[in-house]
Image (cartoon, grey):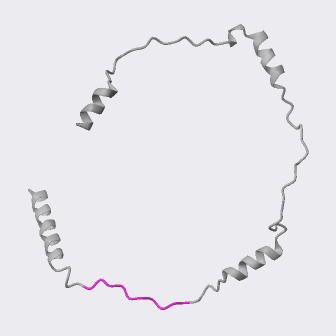
Amino acid sequence: MKTKITLALLALMFSIFQLHADELNFKMQDEAYINDIPFNTTVVLNKIHSNCALSADFELTDEPYINDIPFDTQEVALELIVNNESLSVRMTEEAYIDDIPFDTQKIAVYFLN
């Protein structure tokens, strides 16, 4: 019973609020502009370009090859094949199962008519 009364009161309050919403003034006033963070994009960009080693004509050069991780794929594969004969997995074809009857022509005729 209390929940019904609570819901009824909430509905009543909501409807009263809706009826008088036009009378309420919820307009926010514009705030005055405060220039407390001086920021000039052009100045910042010019500082970056003057202090940066990168320029418009910057080109990446090829780095020398570093063999810091010795890894020979062929050696690893041969070792796996020698130690494990079941390494080669053969996939078998699955039988076709027509469990979803679907006829494109019938569906196209149905939707075109």
- The percent coordinates of residue 67 (x first, y second) are 89, 37
In the displayed structure image, the side of residue 8 where residue 85 appears, left or right: right
In the displayed structure image, the side of residue 54 where residue 10 appears, left or right: left
Q: Quadrant of residue 58?
A: bottom right
Q: Which quadrant of the figure contains the C terminus? A: top left
Q: Which quadrant of the figure contains the N terminus? A: bottom left
- The percent coordinates of residue 98 (x first, y second) are 36, 16
In the displayed structure image, the side of residue 6 where residue 59 appears, left or right: right
In the displayed structure image, the side of residue 29 where residue 47 appears, left or right: right
Q: Quadrant of residue 36?
A: bottom right
Q: Between residues 61 and 10, which one lies in front from this camera angle?
A: 61
Q: Main secondary structure of the magenta part?
A: loop
Question: In the rendered view, would you say 47 is above or below 109?
Answer: below
Q: Between residues 4 and 105, which one lies in front from this camera angle?
A: 105
Q: Is residue 31 magenta?
A: yes
Q: Please provide the residue range marked out in magenta.
A: 25-34
Question: Residue at the spot x=72%, y=79% of the render?
Answer: 44
Question: Residue at the spot x=84%, y=20% of the render?
Answer: 75
- The percent coordinates of residue 89 (x first, y second) are 63, 13
Question: In the rendered view, would you say 2 is above or below 90?
Answer: below
Question: In the rendered view, would you say 77 is above or below 65?
Answer: above
Q: Quadrant of residue 22?
A: bottom left
- The percent coordinates of residue 28 (x first, y second) are 36, 85
